[in-house]
Image (cartoon, grey):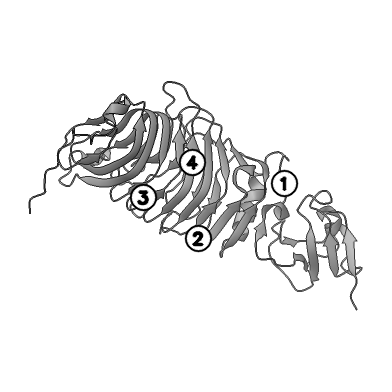
Amino acid sequence: MQHLYAITNIAELQKLNPRDAEHVRVAGYRNPADGGGGDFYWDVNSKLDVDQGHVFQSTHEISGRWRRLPSANIDVRHFGALPSSGDVSNQLQKALNAGESGGTIHIPAGHYTITRPLMVHQGTTVRGDGLLTEIHYSGPKGSSCWNAAQRSPATSMSFYGLNTLVLNEHTSAFRLTGMSYSRFDLLFVHLRVPNTSAYFGPSNGESPYYNVFTNCHASGPGGDSNGCVGFDWGSQDDGDLAPNANQIFGGHVNSVDIAVRCQGTGNIFHGQVIEMVNVGYEFDLPPKRYNAQSQGISNDVMGLYAEYAKVVFEQKHETCYFIAQTAMVTGHELMLKAKSRDNCVLLSSHSGQLPMNRSFFQKAVEFKPLEF
């Protein structure tokens, strides 16, 4: 019969002689009940790389490893990514690497400080506890907190229940490049400084396509002009391609310059709520497409609720076609700012700001059938 020994933390586990105990229960990673403990067994034949989470080496033996008993989900605390414990970028990345062959990475409620980009692998689900899982990102200029580890070919992954706070200018929460066939659910992004974005999506020619966003939110720092964008779906990689065929369901975007910047085609925005923005939806071509033979893009907006968007829709090139239907719009200065009204349809019962003007369809946009 084997006895199960109980020890305080991982440091004690590494110092424990495997000849004294082959099965050990560890109370915590650093301290009892900090969430990083668990059950371990000694694998005398193991030569696995030490990852400081699932696999540890003994100070008494060169060969063999202490191995954590497997569980359904990977808890980031098992790798020393403990809440309110300073910079845990390396520890959290090790947890993400443990899911390289697929799996669910759980980030429990708490405050996590991240100072460099995190790379997420194909087939991985990153799951938090909603607003209570706070990822405080202060990475370098031009970087994003959440990234695809492999940008080509496009990879599928999912994110659920995370609250990412962006703390440095010219950074973003999610970089969507390399992410296609992916899901984004119940996500919160707080842009704490100007010139930042929440869901940043430059394309590399293969992605980001065919993604679904459900109940994804973005909040900016306020002010008259802060340079922030909620869904920034442009062509910043090559100036030629942008996200295509993505769908957004619900979510709230507020206190940014632009709620949605879209330079791709075939995207559908369902039931979003936007408040206190300079521009609700900006449709434009990628820079290299301005002089190309093929120029047009087409996107749909359905069931929009908007309060105090100065310009609700802005069309920056005459071939940026869209169909939009609004549920409620109030406090705006201009419903539509357009280069051309051909082949665009805008249906809104809120053409003015007084109640007596809210029972008529907006008649500013004409419909011109395409000729074949």
* Residue lying at 22% horizontally and 34% vertically, measured from the top left: 362
Q: Which residue is mark 3?
A: 204
Circle nearer the viewer, 4 or 3: 4
The reply, left or right, for residue 218 in relation to residue 127 is left
> Does residue 172 show up?
no
Q: Which mark is residue 122?
A: 2
Q: In the rendered structure, which amino acid carries the disc numbered 1?
A: Leu
Q: Which residue is mark 4?
A: 217
Label 4: few (<14), some or many (≥20) within 10 Å? many
Q: Which residue is mark 1?
A: 82
Pick the residue in front: 179 or 45. 179
Mark 4 / mark 3, whichever is N-terminal: 3
> Does residue 31 show up?
yes
Mark 1 / mark 3, whichever is N-terminal: 1
Cα–Cα gap, marks 4 and 3: 25 Å
Mark 4 / mark 1, whichever is N-terminal: 1
Cα–Cα gap, marks 4 and 1: 26 Å
| Quarter of the view holding residue 53 | bottom right
Q: In the rendered structure, which amino acid carries the disc numbered 2?
A: Gln
